[in-house]
Image: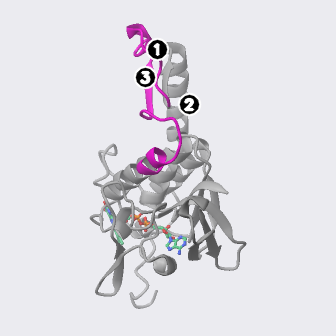
Amino acid sequence: MYDVCIVGGGVSGLAASIFTARAGLDTLVIDGGESILARNASLENYPGFPDGVDARQYLRLSREQAENAGAAFELGRVTSIEPVTERDLDDGFVLETKGGEPLEARRVVAASWSDSDYLVPLDVGRIQRGSKHFVSVDQGGRTAVDGIYAAGRLADEPHQAIVAAGHGAKVGLAVIHDSDANFYHDWVAPEGYFTGRGREVPPCCEEIDDAERRERDERARKRLLEAFDEPLDEEPTMHPSVEGD
Ligand SMILES: Cc1cc2nc3c(=O)[nH]c(=O)nc-3n(C[C@H](O)[C@H](O)[C@H](O)COP(=O)(O)OP(=O)(O)OC[C@H]3O[C@@H](n4cnc5c(N)ncnc54)[C@H](O)[C@@H]3O)c2cc1C
């Protein structure tokens, strides 16, 4: 049984998985194939990229970051979720996928804009607006069903990538807090930041010395230079109802 299964490997799901995996939770991301951000032509309002960034490259690098953190990925569509046992939601949930084997997870994050039909049997509190369904959540993305969370656009957050990513991170943190993971903050601090004040390094924080900092910086710069050396040979996905597509 996974500690957490994240349904949807788009912007919010990837951010959630980076946090849960880095906190040591056994994390699986099941992704239906394509984030809606793959339709973007140039991502120009995501902080950190002064002249914008190729949205598909951003998605690839975020996924790589989640994999580096230890998250596992499966391609597939979740079709239904049910509790393992009716009497105790702490026993976790069974997720059925289209054409795949059922999976079990203690907690589930629905980050699957725009599909939430698989949540219907659980009665999490879906709201219909026009042709779309949203899921009602509290501040941490918790739904009416213990152990089930929703993140990103599906949780009625504004339709912007940075908001979806931030919300995914916040929901990931709620999952961590609700589990028995020993967690303070996910921080990397310079050597002495805590210990120099006679404090222990708190759980999920790390102190690194200058040599290690330079080594990590070198590795990070190398990877980014390599990723952005050539333009990505992928076109934005067109809206399915545009004629001729
Ligand atoms: C044309 C266009 C341009 C845009 N441009 C910008 C922009 O410039 N700046 C900006 O800030 N935002 C932009 N956005 C909005 C941005 O893409 C979204 O707000 C953001 O992607 C929402 O993130 P999310 O994680 O909620 O959903 P998504 O990123 O769409 O991720 C949802 C994931 O869930 C998966 N999924 C769905 N159903 C299932 C299922 N049953 N089982 C498993 N997986 C499933 C999907 O395959 C997808 O990968 C644009 C959107 C569009 C359409």
Q: Position of residue 58 (x, y in %)?
A: 45, 53
User: Which region shows up in magenta?
Assistant: 174-203
Residue 228 shows up from this direction: no
Q: Quadrant of the N terminus?
A: bottom right
> Can you name the residue that lies furthest to the right here?
101
In front: 196, or 86?
A: 86
Task: Give me the residue at 51% from left, 51% from top.
Answer: 17
> Magenta span has 187?
yes
Check if mark 1's residue and mark 2's residue have beta carbons within 8 Å. no
In front: 93, or 13?
A: 93
Q: Secondary structure at mark 1?
A: loop
Q: Position of residue 33 (x, y in %)?
A: 56, 70
Which mark sits nearer the N-terminus, 2 or 3?
3
Task: Residue type at mark 2: give it.
Answer: Arg
Which mark sits nearer the N-terminus, 1 or 2?
1
Which residue in the protein does label 1 denote? 191
CA gap, disc 1 and disc 2: 19 Å
Residue mark closest to the camera, 1 vs 2:
1
Task: Give me the residue at 61% from left, 61% from top.
Answer: 91
Which residue in the protein does label 3 denote? 189
Q: Secondary structure at mark 2?
A: helix
Task: Residue type at mark 3: give it.
Answer: Ala
Q: Horizontal placement of 209 versus 243: left or right?
A: right
Which residue in the protein does label 2 denote? 219
- Its colouring scheme is one colour
Task: Give me the residue at 34% from left, 64% from top.
Answer: 137
Q: Horizontal placement of 94 versus 121: left or right?
A: right
